[in-house]
Image (cartoon, helix red, strand yellow):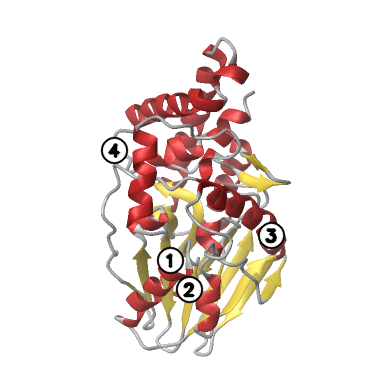
Amino acid sequence: MSRLSAISLLLVLLIGAPLGTASPGLFFPIGHARAAQQASPVAGSTGGTLYTFDSGEAGFFTKTYFYDTGAEVVAFDAQFTPELAEQAMAFLREQTDNPITYLVLTHPNPDKFNGAPAFQDDGAEVIASQATTDAIPGVHAYKKAGFVGMGMFTEETYPQEATVDETFTGTHTIELSDGQKVELSELSEPGVSSTQTVAFIPELNALIVGDLVHHKLHAWLEGGIVDGQATPTIDGWIADLQELETTFAGDPEPTVYGGRGEPAPLSEAVADQIAYLERADQIVTDYVAALGDPQTELSGDQAGAHYAAIQAELAEAFPDYAFPDMISFSVYGLVNSKL
């Protein structure tokens, strides 16, 4: 999406034009956004390094992680467009010339899979769980319809549907050429999306979890896209976080690298994310219950004002969290689940 398109969308939002009732979470969040920051590289015990690319506002502040073993690179999540994926790879090339051999998709959201073809063109093999692979077509169709319907893309310019080269169910270990490995695990419940994979890098004691964790940044509350509907499962998300802590707790504890936000120790990341989700769920439950006629008030032109009011409550509850616009652009899913 061009900067001009983003500005045009912002003007639409500021003058109070309809957000739409089908899928307001399809909008790009603009405003109150911080500039992208590339985190310092994290060095491993035997020569490996973790690099972080942050897309900035053009791609929801989505992070792509690159694990460079010293011989090859494993990438995690592909960005919202092939152009952003190419920027991520260009950033990597400033750090290393080692080839990207694998791209891991942590869950079926378009900011994780839309950029996958660019990685494949660069020679990477795309790996995802079978559940994520099965979900991609439905998510792609839902998001494409929204963005094309808004006029932000055309049928021709919206990213092509991503394809996966290798699938797995349960767990899978990527064996790398120099003896290092990446361990992939599906979690038991739907989390931020309809299905969730996490990746553990033993050399770095690093746990890459996609958008399951937004540490110190407001969460995406749309839910997974299931049968053409946004389907949030806060209980499942919390269960996944608890499973994460049970499965990967250690001494020293691993560092969690989320799809957005800051890295954090596992116990801190889990506790803070659960507290956030519980508070967000309660705020939305109470807000919807207080409406006289929720079905009417949350439809058409009125919906945007209510999403903004919920955003204001959550921003006040978590004043040190970045990017509050994430709420009003995604909370429709959680709101609709209360109707």
In primary-sequence order, the first of circles 2 and 4 is: 2
Residue 14: image quadrant is top left
Label 2 sits on what residue type? Ala
Q: Which mark is residue 137?
A: 3
Q: Nearer the viewer, residue 309 or 286?
A: 309
Label 3 sits on what residue type? Pro
Residue 163 visible in the shown view: yes
Q: In the rendered view of the protein, which quadrant contains the N terminus? A: bottom left
CA–CA distance between discs 4 and 3? Answer: 36 Å
Say whether marks 2 and 1 touch (CB < 8 Å): yes
Q: Residues within 10 Å of mark 3 (few under 14, many from 20)?
A: some
* Residue receiving disc 1: 64
Q: Nearer the viewer, mark 3 or mark 2?
A: 3
338 vs 225: above or below: above
Residue 232 x %, y %: 61, 39
Residue shown at 46%/86% (left/top)?
A: 72
